[in-house]
Image (spheres, rainbow, N blue to C red):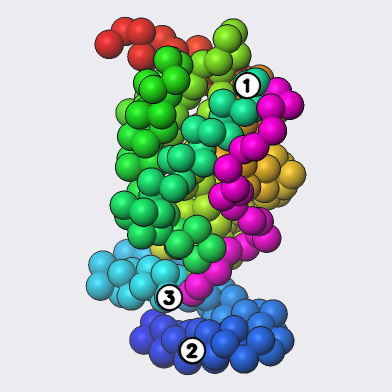
Amino acid sequence: MINEYIEKTQIAINEYLKSLKKSSNTKVYLNVVEKYFKDIYRYVEENIDSISTTDLARIHGLENSLHGFIVTFKTDLTAPNEVKNSDEYLLKTITYFARKQLYKKESVDFATDSLRKYDLDATKYVKDMCDRLGLLCYTVNIKNTFNIPKDHNISIVKIDSLYYLIDLTYQQFFLVGQNFKNRFLKSASHIDTCEVGARILYRNHGGAVELLEKGYIRCDDDMFEDYFSTMYSQYGKDSLSKDEYLNIILKNKKAK
């Protein structure tokens, strides 16, 4: 039965991808794909003890074959040319040069790549720019710092008395195939997923788009709290306040 579900879903995905190239009604095809995934997730949930790791990998492969993101955003790749706010100018300078390094050295395409493999590289480029500007910068591995399975690297930068979160690869959490509502609610495939995208858009759509476009947010912004809380909730952990998240990061760094 699972083979039949997988084969039907693969055919539907192929039709969806064709619709993208033809600029036809992609939503109709995506709805069909989601319906088939719903059948897969329900079957997996009901028969999890008998599902092989090979079949789970095939399901994961189906999800990864879907292109595009579940939210519209445009990455800011323009160099700052006006000084309206000194902090903002520094942050735009840092993110601009770090993104340029990702483009030149890693050949990333910010319009289509998930950037999943480049989060550590991004933090290195951010740290390099901060060192040149004389700014305090911490590279934070979320998995190690907060003791959750989500292995993702970000930067925390201090300018004057304010802290900022910089995440230049946040879009890895917004892939279409890894954010279906069925999976978001059930997480039936039991594979570490990118459900963060679906959760944050439900919780703070505007803040998510701002971070995706600009690459940074203030740590006293509501989005800073929502950023971590959506990752916490994915693993059933109680949310903390924005101050508590920041204090954990700073204590962790100062203890080293």
Q: Is residue 68 above or below residue 11?
A: above
Front tag of 2 and 1: 1
Q: Is residue 50 visible?
A: no
Q: Secondary structure at mark 2?
A: helix
Residue labelled with disc 1: 87
Secondary structure beneath dot 1 equals helix
Q: Residue at x 31, y 69 (%)?
A: 57
| Label located before the other in sequence (2 or 1) | 2
Q: Amino acid at mark 2?
A: Asn
Mark 3 or mark 2: whose residue is earlier in sequence: 2
Query: What is the span of residues highlighted in magenta in the rendered image?
Result: 66-85
Q: Name the residue carrying label 3.
A: 65
Q: Earlier in the sequence, mark 1 or mark 3?
A: 3
Quarter residue 93 falls in:
top right
Name the residue carrying label 2: 14
Q: Decide which of 162, 149 is in the foreground and name it.
A: 162
- Label 3 sits on what residue type? Ser
Q: Quadrant of residue 148?
A: top left
Query: Marks 1 and 3, Cα distance to the nearest angstrom?
Result: 40 Å
Which quarter of the rendering shows the C terminus? top left
List x then y, in percent, for residue 32.
Answer: 62, 84
